[in-house]
Amino acid sequence: MKFNIKKYSIGLLVILTISATSCKKYLDEKNYSNFDKSNYFQNAGQAQSFVNGIYTSLYMFQNGDAYGESPFITIELFAGHATSLGQSVNNGNVINQRTDAVNPGFETVWRSSYNAIANANLALDRIPKMAIDQSTKDNLLGQVYFLRAFFYYHLVRLYGDVPLVTTPVEVNSPDLYASRAPQQDVYNLIISDLEAAKKTNLPNTDQTGKVSLGAVKTLLGSVYLTTAGYPLKKTENYAKAAAEVKDVLGWYTLFTDYAYLHDNAHKNQGELIFQSNYLVGVRDNAIPQLTLPFNLQVGSYGDHLGAMIPTDDFVASYEQGDLRAQERQFYFSSYPKDKEPQTIIQFGVHALYKYFHVESALGNGISDENWTFLRLPEAQLIYAEASNEVNGPTQDAYDAVNAIRRRAKLSDLSGLSKDQFRIAIWKERYHELAYENKAYFDVQRTHQTYNPTTNIFGDATTTPTEQGVKFKEQYYLWPIPQREINTNKNLKQNPGW
């Protein structure tokens, strides 16, 4: 649903996105133009529909256009390990570190996140007052606490100090034109929300696309790991991160085939902890088109945008024999031509097989592959890194990372010092979680970046990318979108922008 709120600051008014409560889960977004919040929260079905609507804001990360611009690509290009072969000037400007505050991706994430937060605030205000079954009420509140934390977590990492609004906002509310709150205050709310979600009756795992306790604890582990690094440097949070995800490691199982990460049959299963869910006929996406080589007829898609293409240097940085770097595992460099399977197209580049959707490529070109926000290997690597910072490399930490390496047909890590183990875990994060929107956030919290040509880490602002570009210090944060600065005079721009 499109809703024009350009007159209203940062989008803190209620933007309602309601979906039907059925097997479609939160996929089916409807517009209720006569919505009246004073009489809407009357029964459990209405409350569930409203909460389902909050999930739809997750789609903004995969929103794209004919030029190949999408927030999940913008986030990845900031890390410096991808090229863009398409027509997007904005993508090229990000890669070469000459973008500005009018980049549409910055506004998309800001606006959509605050829309979701506005709806979460309303749900948290109204659901506790409802006369419905307590178990249902607790489950709904657990989902909403997680979702509000999730969107604030992206906002605070991308923009730094951001407006912190926790109650419903009306046109005359003082929070309509809110000032930026310190990052520590935002993280305090995120942690508080996730702790509140833990106390509800969420199931350990969920295969329907909704929030689970596993998702809550994994996200909280990520939050603690992040706050242990820059800029807060709360090193006592390493122990909290390890403790938070330890239970999660036993609730999920690694897939035996990397293809299961991006097919339809294994959505929300196995190692997949939290995904944004899609379904043909209800909600689809352009993830395959955005990540296929530019203008090559691979699959039955109308567009092949080449918006995010891994660099050859990065693909070559995997250890010798690593299954993930082999053809049609995480990457691929050739494929049969659409409708002419006897003709093999050589790409001339490495594309992301990790995001290739066989069902739509061989079908009608309409993709409904899910986007993964959290999966088991991230929880394993959070545990390994965080516990190492507290106790050095324990057997449990080795077990967590070696399970990932064994699946990749690599030898176990062993006999490493604390410093050596830290670097080994960082490399595993880059190689296992490649192009999943983790690398840029790792640069932010460590101020180190991976150089694939030398296979070592260096200072982020002095180590050139594969394109020969050095990371500008201002790029540790995104700029506040210029439209928001123009509308809300209480917002001040980030340094350098």
Image: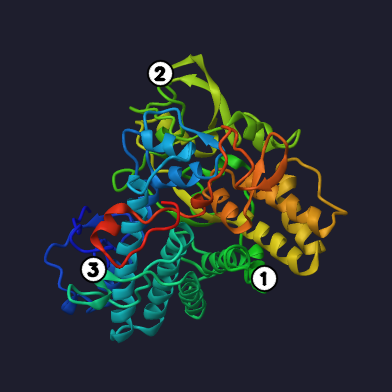
- At 15% from the left edge and 73% from the top edge, which residue is drawn? 36
**SS type, badge 1:** loop
**Which of marks 2 and 3 precedes in the sequence?**
3
Q: What amino acid type should be assigned to the residue bearing mark 1?
A: Thr
- At 26% from the left edge and 56% from the top edge, which residue is drawn? 29
**SS type, badge 2:** loop
**Side of 281 relative to 411 (left or right):** left
Q: What residue is disc 3 on?
A: 13
Q: What residue is disc 1 on?
A: 235
- At 30% from the left edge and 58% from the top edge, which residue is drawn? 485
Query: In front: 57, or 85?
Result: 85
Question: Can you give x and y, in whole percent of width and height, for residue 182 in the image?
Answer: 45, 72
Alpha-carbon span between mark 3 and mark 1: 37 Å
> Which label lies toward us, 3 or 2?
3
Residue 211 can be seen, yes or no: yes
| Residue 128 lies in quadrant | bottom left
**Which of marks 2 and 1 precedes in the sequence?**
1
**Which of marks 1 and 3 precedes in the sequence?**
3
Q: What residue is disc 2 on?
A: 339
Looking at the image, the residue that sits furthest to the front is 496
